[in-house]
Amino acid sequence: MSKKVFLSMSTDVIHGGHINIIKRASELGELTVGVLSDEVVASYKRFPVLSCDERMKIARAITGVKNVIRQDSLSYRTIIDAIKPDIVVHGDDWKTGFQEPIRNEVINLLNEYGGELVEFPYTINEEFDQIEASVREQLSMPDIRRGRLKKLIGMKGTITALEAHSGITGLIAEKTAVLQDGKTYQFDAMWVSSLCDSTAKGKPDIELVDMTSRFKTIDDIMEVTTKPVIFDGDTGGLAEHFIYTVRSLERMGVSMVIIEDKTGLKKNSLFGTDVSQTQDTVENFCYKIRAGKKAQKTKDFMICARIESLILERGMDDALMRAFAFVEAGADAIMIHSRKKDPSEIIEFIKSFRANDKITPIVIVPTSFNSVTEDEWKAIGANVIIYANQLTRSGFPAMQSAAKMILENHRAKECDEALCMPIKDIITLIPEE
Ligand code: SPV
Ligand code: MG
């Protein structure tokens, strides 16, 4: 009886090297190919250019492939348990790096029943590397980047965004990845926060940093990243001005603008009722949303309406009434905000909203109510979780400490040793293209 062979395929750009490995794997027995789901590819590598269904069709058409199955996790555990392959095949490039624990798990699982891991030498293919680089370049282009937020929400149900206020913080949001329990975790998108953009410029968060400057921040971030961008549009200004903001953001490739239902001199929401802030009327804000939706040129750009009723202590009924009115006016998503540590008012809002509206994405910014996990938010019904200011709040205190340490020691030695990244690391942090 021929042996059962299993090979996992994550790529959507197939080259001769892949065909070679498939051919050699098929010579070992009856070959089953696992095709990684879109969600897994997006979280460990990059957004897949071809969908899982397309990639499965391609795999089926390759000579030597007998069966094709969907693989829903980077870990092979479920598949190995289900099909008990005699042989698992992989390139030998996963012995070190982030795939090492996955390889170890495969070896342990195979050892349990006498299965075997066969590793073929990984062939470096310059042409493939160039294609891969050009795919990444394409992903950063406005028309391709813009629609990806909507697709990711559809694909994953709940996504995360990390604050970015410069090229380097954008790169941190783009590249930071963690491998945990056979899964890779990355942020899905970036949040260009008004608070952090203003703070980076040493200014208060009161719509003082003008749009030209805010757009420059977006441009700095977009120049070096590929992930979708959510822009904090503050109040959106006058409807007559907001329509131009919408068009500019769309042109740049931003995926979503969030505007809050406040008017006049806007202050940061986390001040709550400690400062005087005015909520806009439902009528005015709906007019602004309608104007924005009418102005946009593409179908994938999203306008999210942010409700400040809980921040301003106007009550749950007011928040819900506004949410339904804003969706009726055309908002593609709603954001509900709170500055309470206890998440219960946000949870109550989401549950009540979801009782009447199952589809409109709900955005949350759990800065104060930070104890709930992403999986719990997903179960409650939230779709976009924004970590709105953590890079700013962690980065600037570190700089202050460094400045103080130099002053205290009248030289940099202590600060260098205690706090600083080696010079070699900082100059290689950003690779030259
Ligand atoms: C921001 O990050 O600028 C926000 C979120 O608007 S919050 O600071 O919580 O109001
Ligand atoms: Mg803001």
Image (cartoon, helix red, strand yellow):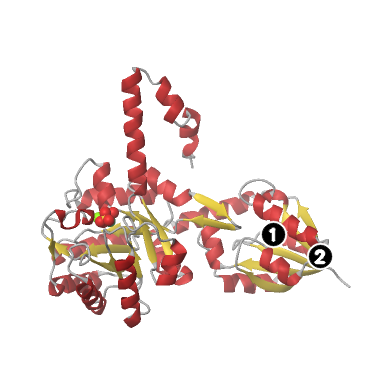
Residue lying farthest bottom? 356
Ranked by sequence position, the earlier of labels 2 and 1 is 1
Q: Quadrant of ligand 2?
A: bottom left
Task: Estimate the x, y position of residue 237 in percent, counting from the top left.
Answer: 16, 61
Task: Estimate the x, y position of residue 76 in percent, counting from the top left.
Answer: 67, 63
Secondary element at tag 2? loop
Dot 2: within a 10 Å radius of its alpha carbon, few (fewer than 14), some, or many (20 or more) residues?
Answer: many
* Amino acid type of the residue tagged 1 in the rendering: His
Quadrant for the N terminus in the image: bottom right
Q: Is residue 39 left or right of residue 283?
A: right
Q: Is residue 385 left or right of residue 310?
A: right
- The Cα–Cα distance between marks 2 and 1, rounded to whole angstroms, is 21 Å
Q: Is residue 45 visible?
A: no
Instruction: Write the residue at 61% across / 58% down.
Output: 182
Instruction: Write the residue at 20% across / 50% down.
Output: 205
Label 1 beta carbon less than 8 Å to ligand 1: no
Residue 74: image quadrant is: bottom right
Residue 299's label in the rendered image is none
Pair 2/1: label in front: 2
Task: Estimate the x, y position of residue 163 in percent, counting from the top left.
Answer: 35, 52
Q: Which residue is mark 2?
A: 86
* Amino acid type of the residue tagged 2 in the rendering: Asp
Residue 18's label in the rendered image is 1
Secondary element at tag 1? helix
Label 2 beta carbon less than 8 Å to ligand 1: no
Dot 1: within a 10 Å radius of its alpha carbon, few (fewer than 14), some, or many (20 or more) residues?
Answer: some
Is 163 situated above or below 309? above
Task: Estimate the x, y position of residue 379 in percent, counting from the top left.
Answer: 44, 71
